[in-house]
Image (spheres, grey):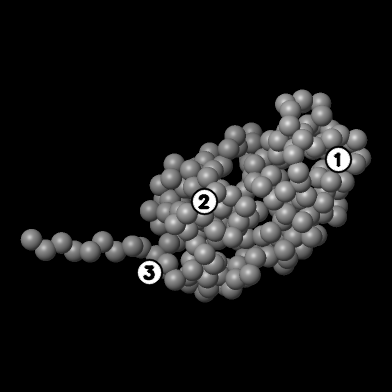
Amino acid sequence: MTTTPSVVPMPAAVLFDFDGTLIDSAPGILASFGAALRVTGLEPAVPLAPSLIGPPLAKTAATLLGRDDPAAVQALVAAFRDDYDTAGYRSTAVYEGVAAMLDGLAEARIALHIVTNKRIAPTRRILEHLGWTARFTGIYALDALTPPAPHKPALVTEVLRREGLAAPRSWMVGDSAEDRRAAQTNGLRFFGAAWGYGAAAEGGLGHPLELLRALP
């Protein structure tokens, strides 16, 4: 009996995490957290390091403080936002190869979407700062929904629904275990960004342009 090899369809859309996948936001985020600590007089329990980046802001603040103190977390988050939304976001860098990867996907007429734990306000500021806003069909963050999405798997579910995307023809690229879980929960093919901050590198992409080589 002869079996016909399965054909992997060309993706109609690719969903991208933002921090640690398309952009290196560590310099700005860490500088703004440093400024926030100085303004509030709070003491960090752990070093300011890129490993903090990825989770929602309040969780990152609690990790940095080493305690679940709602008042302290709220104060640190507010001070961080004041600094990052006016100055820190401008220190964002683009990973090598990302712009060429996005160009290649656009040339293949693949719709590009952002799904991020980052707040929607600085996400849009960064995209405008980089001249990238028009590159993406959809720009989604947890706090862009009403009510906010509780986590990234739920956010991806809503993006698929709103954009009318079929899971078998949608890919996702991210650097964290949560990104991988969001893709698997929703039936998307997942690619780990080995250059990012998270733990999704195993079996993933070593360079952004490798995603283009994965196209059928």
Disc 2 versus disc 3: nearer the observer:
2
- Disc 2 to disc 3: CB gap under 8 Å: no
**Total numbered labels:** 3
CA distance separating discs 1 and 3: 49 Å
Q: For the residue labelled by badge 1, is the local secondary structure a helix, a strand or a loop?
A: helix
Task: Name the element at disc 2.
Answer: loop
- In the rendered image of this protein, does residue 45 appear above or below residue 26? above
Type of the residue with mark 2: Ala
| Residue appearing at x 49%, y 47% in the figure | 180
Name the foreground residue: 41 vs 137: 41
Taking 171 as reference, is 51 above or below it?
Answer: above
> Residue 164 at what x, y percent from top left?
47, 50
Q: Is residue 181 visible?
A: yes
Residue 168 appears left or right of 34 = left
Residue labelled with disc 3: 216
Within-10-Å neighbours for mark 2: few <14, some 14–19, many 20+ = many
Q: Please report whichever mark, 2 or 3, sits nearer to the chain's N-terminal start.
A: 2
Q: Residue at x 47, y 58 (%)?
A: 204
* Structural crowding at the residue carrying mark 1, measured as other residues with C-alpha within 10 Å and reported as few (<14), some (14–19) or many (≥20): many
Quadrant of res 36: top right
Indicate the quadrant containing the N terminus: top left, top right, bottom left or bottom right: bottom left
* Residue 200: mark in rendering: 2
The residue that label 1 is drawn on is: 37
Secondary-structure class at tag 3: loop
Image depth: mark 1 or mark 3 in front: 1
Residue drawn at point x = 50 percent, y = 59 percent: 14
